[in-house]
Amino acid sequence: MASGVASVWVPVDDMERAVRFYGETLGLSVSSTSPVWSEIDADGLMIGLNAREGTARRADGGAVVSFQPDGGIEEEVERLQRAGVEFTGGISDHEWGRIAPFKDSEGNDLQFYAPPA
């Protein structure tokens, strides 16, 4: 039985670029860095940036990491768009909440999530 999420591993092609994206662009705390593994603290959840080892670049599929925006979802989308972040769709409303999908610097799928009002 799983009791929670210990960490999320995200494959990256360019470690320096990925650390800048998660640390500077998203504003998360960078815990440690190396050329093959870096750790990001996302409010107590460790995101491990794992250097790819000969895998296909930017392959589709896999996990999606969801972030809770500090402010409103619209404001965070606008802030990241100004920073050059690629959004793959607009904000969509669902009975279970709102999402805004985007890509990290390495082409991985991320999204903002806001619970229903």
Image (tube, helix red, strand yellow):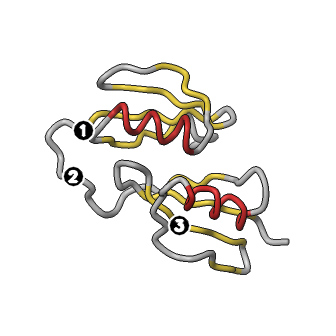
Residue 99 in picture, x, y percent from top left? 63, 69
User: Quick check: 93 left or right of 23?
Assistant: right
Q: CA distance from mark 3 to mark 2?
A: 19 Å
Residue sitting at 69 percent across and 72 percent down?
98
Q: Quadrant of the N terminus?
A: top right
Q: Amino acid at mark 3?
A: Pro
Res 1 seen here: no
Q: Residue drawn 63% across and 52% down?
A: 67
Q: Which residue is mark 3?
A: 101
Q: Amino acid at mark 2?
A: Arg
- Mark 3 vs 2, N-terminal side: 2
- Dot 1 lies on which element? loop
Residue bearing mark 2 = 57
Disc 2 element: loop
Q: Residue furthest front?
A: 82
Label 3 sits on a secondary structure element that is strand
